[in-house]
Amino acid sequence: SAVISQKPSRDICQRGTSLTIQCQVDSQVTMMFWYRQQPGQSLTLIATANQGSEATYESGFVIDKFPISRPNLTFSTLTVSNMSPEDSSIYLCSVGDRNYGYTFGSGTRLTVV
Amino acid sequence: GNSVTQMEGPVTLSEEAFLTINCTYTATGYPSLFWYVQYPGEGLQLLLKATKADDKGSNKGFEATYRKETTSFHLEKGSVQVSDSAVYFCALGISGNTGKLIFGQGTTLQVKP
């Protein structure tokens, strides 16, 4: 299965600022997925990132707040913009498919103060 | 719509006890089913999967059978160890090419010596 390197692993940010999270995969993949795990909660899909096209956002998530880049088949970034304390969560990227399963990055633990 | 319901935790067991964590789902089409595990301070790991009805996924002594008639995918282990203490997530991979995973709320397992 693919190996994902995600960084930063954690950060503490001031409200109103932005943080960009990076995910690097060791193989070429068509789709990359970004999830959010709020404290004590389950995972929720933010968006699906395809190379060469706009990301597809789930209900409740918008591009202005969570812009995503996908410049090639092994890399993607998620930016959390104009942060507030409510954005404090773990953010994870993922690759895979429903037949073989999905691999997750180690996550970025974000605290907004 | 598509959804996953897990039994509420936390579940506390003594070492060598039998474990069952219930998971039921609602889905259109023919989903794949997964169990993920999140050990304390670590990322999400795929524990096992099943891609069609009556498939049994197994790994590390854990098993789960895809039961279409009862829309269930219960996780079982015959003899738990302290090292199995973690949060377990049941997840649904929906039909089609979206690659989207829908997670249950997670069940915390604590195994005492």
Image (tube, coloured by chain):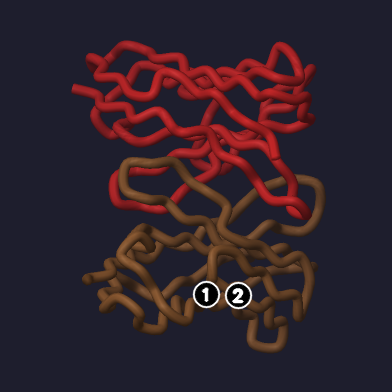
Task: Please provide percent x and percent y for residue A68.
Answer: 59, 20
Could you tell me which secondary element the residue under label 1 belongs to? strand
Residue in view at x 42 percent, y 51 percent? B38
Q: Residue flagged by tag 2: what amino acid is it?
A: Ala
Q: How many marks?
A: 2
Q: Residue flagged by tag 1: what amino acid is it?
A: Leu
Residue placed under numbered mark 2 in the picture: B64
Q: Is residue A7 above or below residue A62?
A: above
- Letter of the chain in brown: B
Task: Please provide percent x and percent y for residue A82.
Answer: 35, 16
What's the chain of the residue with tag 1? B
The quarter of the picture where the C terminus of chain B appears is bottom left
Per the rendering, the colour in which chain A appears is red
Residue in view at x 50 percent, y 78 percent? B76
Asked if the residue under mark 2 is in contact with the one under mark 1, i.e. CB atoms within 8 Å, the reply is yes
Residue A52's image quarter?
top right
Left or right of A72? Residue A62 is left
The answer to whether any part of residue B107 appears in the image is yes
Left or right of B44? Residue B8 is left
Q: Is residue B72 above or below residue B60?
A: below
Residue placed under numbered mark 1 in the picture: B75
Could you tell me which secondary element the residue under label 2 belongs to? strand
In the foreground, A64 or A96: A96
Ranked by sequence position, the earlier of labels 1 and 2 is 2
